[in-house]
Each structure stands twice: as C-alpha cells, then as structure tokens.
Image (tube, rainbow, N blue to C red):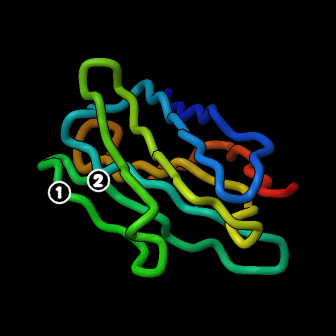
Amino acid sequence: QVHLVESGGGLVQPGGSLTLSCTASGILFSVSTMGWYRQAPGKQRELVAKIFASGNTRYEDSMKARLTISRDNDRKMANLQMNNLTPEDTAVYYCYAYVPTGERGEYWGQGTQVTVSS
C-alpha cells in the first residue's frame, strides 16, 4: 500500500523559512518523480516544485528563487525548503509522487497546512 506522509508545516512569520518533508512507502522511490503542490482557499491546486529521478528539478517560476527541492532515495524522502515566506504562501501543501513502475500511478499525501502570518 502506498503512503505519502507530509510533515513540517505550521505557522511562520513573514520573511521566515520552512522545510517540508514527505516520507514515502510502498513505492519504488528511486525511480519516481516527487513533487510539491499547494492549494490556497478558493484557488486551484498548483505546482510548487518537482524533482525527477535523475535529480533534475522544476520550480514554479514566481517562487523559484525562494525554493529548494531535494530527495533522499535511501530514506525515501523528498524535502522542500522555502525561504522568505509571505502571507501569499499560505496554503495546504501536498506531496505528490509519479511512480512509473511497480505500484504505477500518481499519488498524493494528505497535505500539511502552512500559514504565514505575523
């Protein structure tokens, strides 16, 4: 059974930093694309960052300078470091996995709330 479990969300002040972590189980992690999406109230879910099995990355353009996505294949974890957060970053952040083999398919975590407020 596939599980994606997010951690690291919470309340942070404007200008602060936060690191989100996603721990995967039940998938061939090393060959999977991992990503982070977010959904703010009243808005559609949008891509924040992805990291491919090759280690190549893709970021949402407007956030690119403030983000770093990384992966640890041994621990089956994908991390997202976010810097200089603003209230507009307030959203539920979801871990995403695209698994090309084995338990093939797209999977989502339950989400973790990030609130940026003073």
Of 67 and 49, the residue lying toward us: 67
Q: Nearer the viewer, residue 60 or 117?
A: 117
Q: Helix, strand, or loop for circle 1?
A: loop
Which residue corresponds to the image point at 19% horizontal and 41% vertical from the top-left? 31
Residue drawn where x is 25% and y is 59% of the image: 57
SS category of the residue bearing label 2: strand
Tell me whether the residue at label 2 lies in contact with that at label 1, contact meaning CB atoms closer than 8 angstroms.
yes
Residue 106 screen position, x and y as percent: 43, 54
Residue 105 visible to an observer of this rendering: no
Residue 41, above or below 8: below
| Relative height, residue 87 to residue 100 (above, below) | below
Q: Nearer the viewer, residue 107 or 5?
A: 5
Residue of label 1:
56
Badge 2 amino acid: Ile
Disc on res. 51: 2
- Name the quadrant of the C terminus: bottom right
